[in-house]
Image: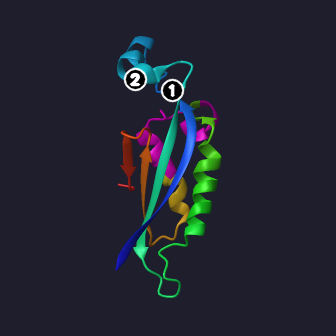
Amino acid sequence: MKVTVSRKAHFNAAHRLFRKDWSHAKNEQVFGLCNNPNFHGHNYELIVSVTGEIDPETGYVIDMKVLKNVIKEEVEEAFDHKNLNVEVPEFKALNPTAENIAVVIYNKIKPRLNADLSLEITLFETPRNFVRFSGE
């Protein structure tokens, strides 16, 4: 029997959506206000969901204290109150869209979990705009 457990987290970060190889006009056309050269910020809400078998000894899929610490180390400490384009190495050459941020978070957390556990990342960039990524 597989069960999914989830933990919410939060971080604030600034970013700018643009491509260096595009003209200013094309960046403006595609990314609009998100292409602000002075950056803009979001209050990101994150849901990290882990699916697996319940351990018969502990009754856990994963110890939530362990998951909390992984999220703190891999996401909150790395992204919170940062300019993603400037201060986060993963986005030096990767446009920090919500989609790409979710994939980066997945790739940072997945190696920290037991191999038999599945992971899904849900990232809210705004209360109405969110993405989900589960490694596929």
* Amino acid on which disc 1 is placed: Arg
What span is in magenta? Answer: 86-105
Task: Name the spot of residue 44 as percent of width and height, x first.
Answer: 50, 42
Quadrant the N terminus occupies: bottom left
**Secondary structure beneath label 1:** loop
Among the 4 quarters of the image, the one containing residue 30: top left
Q: Which mark is residue 65?
A: none
Q: Which is nearer the N-term, disc 2 or disc 1?
A: 1
> Which residue bears the numbered disc 2?
31
| Magenta span: chief secondary structure | helix
Residue type at mark 2? Phe
Q: Label 1 belongs to which residue?
A: 16
Coloration of the structure image: rainbow
Number of on-image labels: 2
Residue depicted at 44% across the width and 73% down the height: 116
SS class, disc 2: helix
**Residue 123 position (above or below residue 82):** below
* Magenta segment includes 94: yes
